[in-house]
Amino acid sequence: MTRLISVSLMLIVVLSGASVEAQVSANAETFTGLHRNEGVRGQPETVTVTDGKSFIRLTVQEYRAAGYWPLYEALPMIVVRRLPVRIPVPNDRKD
């Protein structure tokens, strides 16, 4: 039983390490810009880049400094607005 748990933990460490390595090694030759993300509640705008297999979010400054293609201004903007949820109350329960 102990061996099974230790093997499972080792597998988790190995698999998570590969994804971290892929994120660190993103470069402008293999990754391209997909879209811009609007900054919300004081957060900066970000850009999503992809190599066709994984997606990484970068700040606008990181995107421009690395020389990703296409230009930042040419990327489409994704705007997400979340509205508060209101639970309808039946008329007989209203005060």
Image (cartoon, grey):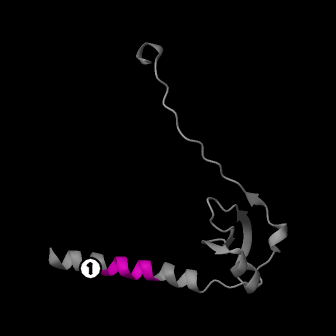
Point 28% across, 75% down: residue: 8
At 49% from the left edge and 26% from the top edge, which residue is drawn?
88
* Whether residue 72 is situated above or below residue 30 in the rendered picture: above
Q: Nearer the viewer, residue 9 or 89?
A: 89
Main secondary structure of the magenta stretch = helix
> Which quadrant would residue 78 be assigned to in this image?
bottom right
Residue 40 is left or right of residue 60, and the answer is left
User: Do we see residue 66 in this rendering?
Assistant: yes
Tally of numbered discs: 1
In this view, the residue in front, 71 or 92, is 92
Work out whether 11 lies above or below 81: below
What amino acid is found at the position of numbered circle 1 in the picture?
Val
Locate residue 9, reporting x and y percent. 29, 77
Disc 1 crowd, CA 10 A, few/some/many (<14, 14-19, 20+): few
Residue under label 1: 7
Instruction: Identify the secondary structure beneath mark 1.
Output: helix
